Image (spheres, rainbow, N blue to C red):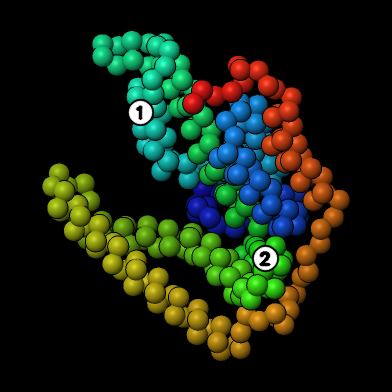
Amino acid sequence: MKKLKLGGYLPGDSLIHRLDPRTKLLGGLAIIITILAVNSWPVFVLNTVLIFLVVYLEKIDFKAVLQGVKWMWMIILLSFTFQCIFVKGTPLVVIGRLIITREGLYLGVLTFLRLLILYLSSTILTMTTSPLKLASGLEALFSPLRYLKVPVNQLAMLISISLRFIPTIIEEAEIITKAQKSRGAPFSSAKKLVRLQTGMAVFIPLIVGSLQRATDLATAMESRCYTGGSNCSRLKKLNFGRTDLMALALIAASCILPLFCFHGRFWQVPR
């Protein structure tokens, strides 16, 4: 659990694991669109609660889920600080020439929740859905595009393979970095040029390894006569049941109902 990588699939038998991949794809897409398009506090609060409820139901250690947030803290902190200082509005705290406004504080908290929900929703999707099921769900959702001559099967397989390689590339980057450190690579050098050259010593082998892995995968798929056509069959078929319908209804309620229940100015984030 402690070695769980970003974007990696963790097998399980929880309620979230058993959901249809189309349900998780549509639910995650609805949550992402809602938090990007709406500036209503009830929507953000309910979606945050919903995300934490899903993390609890998937029976995965919460620390393992949040371990990937550590690389986002700097972005979150900088965004929060800049919005608190540079957004004009009603002053709350004055420290010399620095003025923290009410509107900037609201937007800073809003950005924090938005980035957290974006990360958790995508992480939950990849942790509870295997690449094959993810490809099946994407193929089923994109199936209407076949009438427009869009290669749905190839597109779904391309997306699923890309998601599958994310944890592999991260793990390989860590291995290369440790190997370079064991050889005395100056990653913490005070000179920027030296650090840049050291970073290239990790970046170049990583790119070469990724290209080689992609070539091996293409060769393996061709040797198994994979063409990606519509006649491709799957061992397990998708099953959309009552649980999936209830999950989508809950997500829709958390995204839409607060917009109709709260119309006061207090609930709206200042622009």
Which quadrant would residue 10 be assigned to in this image? Answer: bottom right
- Give the amino acid type for the residue marked by disc 2 in the picture: Phe
Q: Which label's residue is closer to the chain start, 2 or 1?
A: 1
User: Could you tell me residue 122's position as x and y percent?
Assistant: 57, 49
The reply to whether dot 2 and dot 1 touch (C-beta < 8 Å) is no
Where is mark 1, residue-wise? 82
Q: Residue at 57% of width from left, 30% of height from top?
A: 39
Q: Which is more toward the observer, 222 or 259?
A: 259
User: Could you tell me residue 66's position as x and y percent?
Assistant: 52, 41
Regarding residue 133, the answer to whether it shows in the image is no
Q: What is the spatial separation of the Cα atoms under label 2 and label 1, in whole angstroms? A: 40 Å
- Give the amino acid type for the residue marked by disc 1 in the picture: Phe
User: Could you tell me residue 149's position as x and y percent?
Assistant: 64, 76
User: Could you tell me residue 23's position as x and y percent?
Assistant: 73, 53
Which quadrant would residue 134 be assigned to in this image? Answer: bottom right
Q: Residue at 62% of width from left, 80% of height from top?
A: 228
Left or right: residue 125 compared with residue 194: right
Where is mark 2, residue-wise? 142
Q: Which is more toward the observer, 84 or 177?
A: 84
Residue 52, relative to residue 16: is it above or below?
above
Q: Residue at 47% of width from left, 41% of height from top?
A: 69
Q: For the residue labelled by badge 1, is the local secondary structure a helix, a strand or a loop?
A: helix
